[in-house]
Amino acid sequence: MAKAFRFGLSLRDAFSLFLTDGRVAIDNNPTERALRPIGVGRKNWLFAGAYTGAETLSRAMTIIETAKLNDLDPQSYLADVLDRIHDHKINRLDELLPWNWAPADAENSKAA
């Protein structure tokens, strides 16, 4: 028991960082919930067909989870980006990232 207390006391500053810095969450539950589908699907992805198939799947899951973390509907986001990317200027690709993205209808109404 004393060993556990010594461990806790030695890391007290790290454990109490959320008290002094409002940007630090008290727990990491949102992150763990975002990663849960990846852990659950891991057995299914063993049979992705090939290494390149697994890489493609991991890229897709990264985009989907990033969209969710930015409070976007992944299906709407992907559909819009895939529809617009072919004629989007290459030096403005950052506009299509989930944290900068605005639906095409919103951009058209701004321009009008």
Image (cartoon, helix red, strand yellow):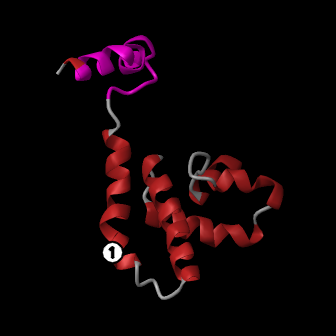
Q: Which residue is mark 1?
A: 43
Nearer-the-camera pick, 75 or 105: 75
Nearer-the-camera pick, 23 or 10: 10
In the picture as drawn, the residue positioned furthest to the left comes out as 1
Position of residue 7 measured from the top left corner of the image (x, y, whole percent): 32, 21
In the picture as drawn, the residue positioned furthest to the bottom comes out as 49
Q: Is residue 38 magenta?
A: no
Magenta segment range? Answer: 3-26
Q: Is residue 10 magenta?
A: yes
Q: Is residue 76 visible?
A: yes
Report the amino acid beneath label 1.
Lys
Q: Above or below — where is 16 with respect to 72?
A: above
Q: Label the magenta part by its dominant secondary structure.
A: helix
In the picture as drawn, the residue positioned furthest to the top comes out as 20
Residue at 51% across, 60% down: 62
Residue at 45% across, 15% down: 21
Residue 80 placement: quadrant:
bottom right
Residue at 58% across, 81% down: 52
Q: How many marks?
A: 1
Position of residue 34 measured from the top left corner of the image (x, y, whole percent): 37, 52
